[in-house]
Image (cartoon, helix red, strand yellow):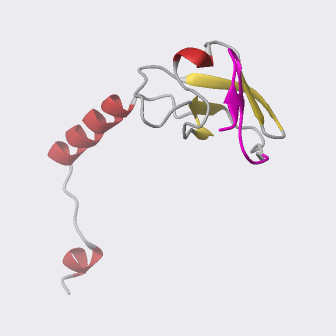
């Protein structure tokens, strides 16, 4: 990223916004967050957020990620997968067909 202020991150490149998608931002890939940073809008290479001060979570030059909000914390998602793995039998197609 080129720069950051309280509510806007300036990326090196122009960003394309997927239609009808809620986007979340990970402002610094080297710092874990316990909450979502919701993207308010993207205009060119400027990413604006509404609910957080980005200066507390990142700095110029840091790497960031942006993508669809999944509405599930990663730890909760991993617990769901672990639970499903205990309750369901997973098999390969070749095992099912007897090959």
The quarter of the picture where the C terminus appears is bottom left
Residue 31 in the image: state x and y as whole percent.
Answer: 42, 29
Specify whether 52 is left or right of 47.
left
Q: Identify which residue is drawn at 21% across, 38% down.
A: 83
Of residue 46 and residue 40, the one placed in the foreground of this image is 46
Q: Identify which residue is drawn at 22% across, 66% down.
A: 91
> Magenta segment, which residues?
1-14
Residue placed furthest toward the bottom = 99
Q: Identify which residue is drawn at 60% across, 39% down.
A: 68
Main SS of the magenta part reads loop
The quarter of the picture where the N terminus appears is top right
Residue 6 within the segment the image draws in magenta:
yes
Residue 11 in the image: state x and y as whole percent.
Answer: 71, 39
> In which image quadrant can residue 7 be found?
top right
Specify whether 94 is left or right of 23.
left
Residue 23 in the image: state x and y as whole percent.
Answer: 65, 33
Specify whether 53 is left or right of 18.
left
Residue 43 within the segment the image draws in magenta:
no
> In which image quadrant can residue 3 be found?
top right
Tally the marks. 0
Q: Identify which residue is drawn at 25% across, 71% down.
A: 92
> In which image quadrant can residue 22 be found?
top right
Of residue 20 and residue 44, the one placed in the foreground of this image is 44
Residue 27 in the image: state x and y as whole percent.
Answer: 56, 30
Residue placed furthest toward the right = 43
Specify whether 43 is left or right of 66.
right
Vertical relation: 18 (above or below) 69:
below
């Amino acid at each position: 990223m080129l720069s950051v202020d309280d509510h806007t991150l300036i990326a090196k490149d122009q960003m394309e916004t997927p239609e009808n998608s809620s986007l979340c931002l990970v402002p610094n890939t080297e710092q874990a967050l316990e909450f979502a940073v919701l993207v308010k809008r993207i205009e060119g290479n400027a990413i604006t957020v509404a609910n957080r001060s980005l200066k507390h979570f990142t700095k110029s030059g840091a790497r960031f990620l942006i993508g669809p909000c999944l509405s599930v914390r990663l730890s909760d998602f991993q617990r769901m997968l672990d639970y499903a793995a205990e309750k369901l039998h997973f098999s390969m197609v070749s095992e099912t067909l007897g090959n």
